[in-house]
Amino acid sequence: MPKKLIALDLDGTTLNNTSTITPKTAQIIQKARDKGHIVSIATGRPYRMSAHYYQQLNLDSPIVNFNGALVHKPQQKWAYEKEYSIQREIAFEILAQKEKLHLDFVAAENRETFFIDNLQNFQKDFFATDTATDANLFSQLKTNPTSVMLKTKNEFSSFVVETLTSQFSDEIEVRTWGGPSAILEVVPKGVQKAMAVSVVAESMQINQKDIIAFGDEHNDVELLDYAGWGVAMKNATDQVKSVANDITAKTNDEDGMVEYLEELLAI
């Protein structure tokens, strides 16, 4: 079998419903790597909120963060690295509509840090850091952020996406993470996971037909459509399933991704 690039979404795909990687998942991914395949995470999360999964899986491959707004090799200089940003003014305009959009918080995100609208909304487990100071307040944002992260309730998620997409149609994309929380990631127009994974594939000299991608949410649609073999999770949205080559027999909470991968790669 030729070497494959395996692009893995995190929330709702690689992670179970408690946002953890099961021992079986770690074991099968290691087996795939031992066979010479490349495993690359492609997530809406910023790096600091995906770093522990990257480390738990012992990866050294490029990683896609912010739904494609950042593709990089952690802690390394990498010739193919790409990073995009949105206009700072858009972040403040979204914040001004926080109540109207039913948002729980608004956080402007950069590679290493974040700026949240109110420190009362800071949750160290969620933001993957122990501290937040006055310097992390939104008012301290001086540069264009890589993305803007929004949290709302599931019943308002579609309304937020439609409203912001309509208002800033030429400037931004609004993508969901997947998983149990209604987390939305606002990134520059045209940025999506497929574009970033194509950069990873080029750097690793992997043909498009040899890319296997797994996902569950609408931020995975372009990726599964682009991949040589796109696989939707059983728990995926109908939109994702409609573009996939196949669907896992089990959900993310039943090791559905790695059981499918194990059979597909015969490992």
Image (cartoon, rainbow, N blue to C red):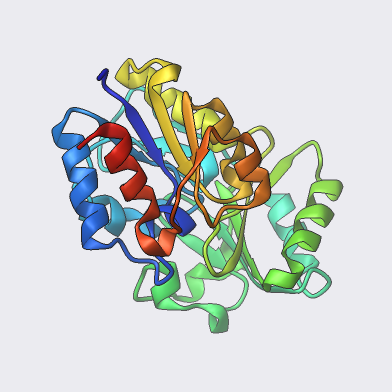
Quarter holding the N terminus is: top left
Q: Is residue 121 visible?
A: yes
Residue 170 percent coordinates (x, y): 80, 36
Residue 129 percent coordinates (x, y): 36, 70
Residue 154 percent coordinates (x, y): 68, 70
Residue 237 percent coordinates (x, y): 63, 52
Residue visible at 38% across and 21% down in the picture: 210
Q: Nearer the viewer, residue 177 or 266?
A: 266
Q: Is residue 86 visible?
A: no
Q: Nearer the viewer, residue 266 or 145?
A: 266
Residue visible at 19% across and 36% down in the picture: 33
Quarter holding the C terminus is: top left
Q: Nearer the viewer, residue 153 or 125?
A: 153
- Give the side of residue 139 with respect to residue 17, left or right: right
Residue visible at 61% across and 44% down in the picture: 240
Residue visible at 55% across and 46% down in the picture: 146
Asked which quadrant contains residue 255, the reply is bottom left
Residue 190 to residue 113: above or below: above
